[in-house]
Amino acid sequence: MSTSIFYSNKRVVVGAITALAFLLFLILVGIDRSDEVTAHTTTYFQRLKNMTSTNSQPSSEQWATMKAYLSEIESAVKGLRTPALSAATVPTGSMEDIMNRTLGVGLPFASILERRDNIAVQASLSNIDMEFVDGVPGDLVDKKSLPWTMDQEPAVVGCWRAHMDVLQMIVAENIQSALIFEDDADWDIGFRAQLKQLARGAKYLQKVDEDAVTRSPYGDSWDMLWLGHCGQFTMDSDKRRFVITEDPTVEPTVHRKYWLENPDMSTWDHPSNAVNDTRIIFRSSGGSLAISLAGARKALFHMSLSPFNAPVDWGYDGLCKNKDTNALCISPYPAMIGVSRPIGPRSRSSDISVHEGYFEHPVSNRTSFSTRLNMKRLINGSRRFKNNYNEEIQLTREEIGTGVGHPEDLS
C-alpha cells in the first residue's frame, strides 16, 4: 500500500470516516435529505481517491477543495432529523406509544450536557432515543439577548439559554411535544409503567375519557408534565387526584428530599404504614419535564420575550402559577424522574450552586429502582434489579411496574 495516503492533515481522513458514518446512519434510519448527503459523500471519496493515487504531496488548492466538500457534507447533515422523529416513532395517541423509543412524545431532549456519557448509556439501556443539546457558557451569552430585568450569575444564564434553545427548536420545528432531561437525570427501571399511569391520570385531569382518541397518549390539552421536580404546589381549585397505590417505585417517606411545599398526602400515607407506597397525579401550580408545543410557545414568551429574572426552573414554575398564561401543568408526587450523584466531589453535581465534600457512594434521589445504580446489571443482562434503599429487595421489571391508579375527588 502506498504511504501517500497517510498525510499529516488528519481532518480529511476524519472527514472521510465521519461522512461514511453519516451515510451508514442515514441508510439505516431513512432520514430526509439522505440523497443530498450521499451525493456529497460520493464526490468527497472520489476526490480523496484522486488525491491519494500518487506519491506527490497534494497542493494547497486540493486541500482547500477537500475542505470545501467537507463543509458541504456538514451543511447537508446539519438539521437532519434523528431516528426519534422518524415515521416509526411518531406518536399516534395510543397508550402503546409510551412503549416506543420516544416514550409517546415527539422527541426527548437531553439538555445541559457537560456530563453526557452517563445519560447516553442510560438512555440506550432504556431504549430511549434522545436529541443531545450542548450546554451554553453563560459568560458567552450576548447581554442584548437577555430578557428585560435579567441579572443572574453566568451559570444561571447559561442554563436558561440552553433551555430557551430547546424550546426554540420545539417551536421552529413544530414538534408537538418533547421531554427535556438534565444530564444528571435518573429514572426508574419501571419508567414506562410509570408513564402509562401518568397518561391515565393526565387524561383524567383533562376530563378526557381514558379510551378517547387523542393525538398524544397523555391527552391534548396539557402544557407541561412535571416528571422531575423538587416539590410542587397544588391547584387549590382542583381537588381531583389520580391515586396510584402499592407502587414499588415510590421512594420511602424518610428519603424524600424536596425543597418546596409538597402535596398533602395524609389521606393515603399513615405513620403506621411504614411503606407509604402511594403516588398521586394532580394539577400543579409549578427538573425534568415534558412540554407540549403550546407549552413551549408560552414558556418562550414568559421567560424570553417578557421581563424575567430568575433561574429557568423558577420560570417554568411561574408559568404554571401565572393565571394569564392559562397553562395546564400536571405533576406526579413523589416525582418520577430523579437526580443521580456519582462518587466524588459534590461540586461536580451542579454548575450553578457550590457544594463541598464528597459522595462516598453513588446515590439517586427520587427513584427506588434507579436505572443508573442498576446500570451494571442492565449491561450484564440481569432480569432482577436492586432497590436503592434495601439491597435485599430485588425485583424484575414486571414486578417493579405493578402500581395501578384510580381517580379520586377530594371535594
Image (cartoon, rainbow, N blue to C red):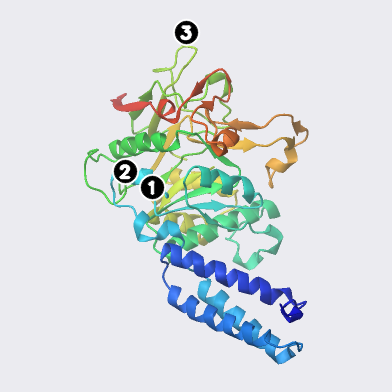
| Residue 267 in which image quadrant | top left
Q: Secondary structure at mark 2?
A: helix
Q: Is any atom of residue 27 visible in this view?
A: yes
Q: Disc 3 and disc 2: Cα gap in Å?
A: 37 Å
Label 3 belongs to which residue? Answer: 272
Label 1 belongs to which residue? Answer: 100
364 or 21, nearer to the observer: 21
| Residue 291 percent across, percent down from the top left | 43, 50
Q: Is any atom of residue 235 visible in this view?
A: no
Q: Amino acid at mark 3?
A: Ser
Which mark sits nearer the N-terminus, 1 or 3? 1
| Residue 14 in which image quadrant | bottom right
Q: How many marks?
A: 3
Q: Amino acid at mark 1?
A: Asn
Q: Residues within 10 Å of mark 3 (few under 14, many from 20)?
A: few
Residue at 50% x, 12% y is 274
Cβ atoms at labels 1 and 2 below 8 Å apart: yes
Q: Amino acid at mark 2?
A: Glu
In this rendering, position of residue 218 left or right of residue 346: left
46 or 244, nearer to the observer: 46
Q: Residues within 10 Å of mark 1 (few under 14, many from 20)?
A: some
Image depth: mark 1 or mark 3 in front: 1
Cβ atoms at labels 3 and 2 below 8 Å apart: no
